[in-house]
Each structure stands twice: as C-alpha cells, then as structure tokens.
Amino acid sequence: MNLFETIEKRRSIRSYKSDHISNRHLKRILEAARLAPSGKNLQPWRFIIVRDPERKRMLAEAAMNQMFIAEADVVIVALSDPTIYSSTGTRRRIPYLQDPMIAIEHMILAATALGYGTCWIGAFNEDKVKQIVNAPEELAVIALLPIGVPNENPPPRPRKSFEEIFFSEVYGNPLSL
C-alpha cells in the first residue's frame, strides 16, 4: 500500500479483535515515531507501551470510560516534556504538543499500512493516566493510542470540500489547480 492509499484507508477504529500485533510489526510502528521530525531535533516525546489487560482497562476508564481502548492489543501512552523548550529559546506555539503529535501520526500511518487499526484518544484524565503508568510529574500526557486488529470497517467520514479549506495567497481567494 502506498502512502496515499494508507492515508485514504485510515479510520478511527473503536472495536478490536483479540489478535496480537507481532513484535516485529510493533517495532516498525514505534520506529516510525522515533524517526519523526521535531523542532530543533529535541525529540521531546516518550512512549509507554501497555499490553497488560488490567492496565489497559484502567487506561480505558481514565479515558472517560471509552472501554474499547482496552480491547486493543497495545495502548501507547504518548508523553512530552514541556520544559525541554524553555532552555533552548524556542518560542514556537505549544511545541511540546505539536512535536509528539507528528510522531503519533507517523505511528498511525505505519499501523494502518501494516493492516492495524488505531484511534487517537484525546479525552482522558491526565492525572489518572500518569498514575496508571507511573509517568513523571513534569511530563504531559499528549494522547492515548490503542493499536490492534480492527473488528470493524467504518466507511469514510464526510470531509469539507477542497475549496473550503485551500486558498491562494490570501484567505478567501480560491485556489485553482
């Protein structure tokens, strides 16, 4: 599957089979995150890979009882260090959030290309998640990412038209390609 097919095929999966992800595939997915770009190459991200059923259940509860999360073979807890930028003079808008999001999307696309499903989880109680995975207080929880064999094949969701989101030179000027 090429990159564009992968992007078109990606869906938010909220039902998973009990099948396992091979360690070889999991390592490829994680390697995609490791290779992601970051501002000043600071790589502020840290990822906790959770496979323990009880810990996954607790994470699902901490994510506003989205219990499908616990069905996935793996749940990745994405963390970032917001303090890393203060000593570098970096003045970008919320880079501790942006940089890990690039790495997470790399994992999502890698997982999709390998035939797995994912769902970006942004609704969670950060303090509870940190406690469950024993994350250091200074790190921020960015997202949870369940990964597993899909047990559903949802259709594509509606998207805004090309003309609604792309402009030429200034806002509101239609882009014609």
Image: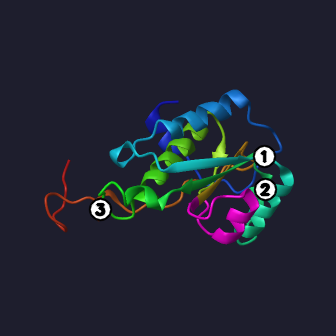
Residue 58 or residue 2, whichever sits in front: 58
Query: Which numbered disc, 3 or 1, marks the residue that appears first in the sequence?
Result: 1
User: At x 30% / y 62%, what residue is drawn?
Assistant: 165
Secondary structure category for the residue under label 1: loop
Tell me the residue that label 1 is attached to.
Answer: 51
- Look at discs 2 and 3 and give the one toward the viewer: 3
Q: Residue furthest front?
A: 87
Can the viewer see residue 124 in this picture?
Answer: no
Neighbours of disc 3 within 10 Å: few (<14), some (14-19), many (20+)? few
40 relative to 24 in the view: left or right: left
User: At x 13% / y 58%, what residue is drawn?
Assistant: 169
Query: Which numbered disc, 2 or 1, marks the residue that appears first in the sequence?
Result: 1
Can the viewer see residue 110 in this picture?
Answer: yes
- Counting from the top left corner in percent of width and height, residue 21 is at 74, 36
Residue 110 or residue 93, whichever sits in front: 93
- Look at discs 3 and 1 and give the one toward the viewer: 3
Tell me the residue that label 3 is attached to.
Answer: 91
61 relative to 41 in the view: left or right: right
- Counting from the top left corner in percent of width and height, residue 121 is at 62, 61
Tell me the residue that label 2 is attached to.
Answer: 56
Question: What's drawn in magenta, residue-wise?
Answer: 121-142
Looking at the rendered structure, the kind of residue marked 3 is Arg
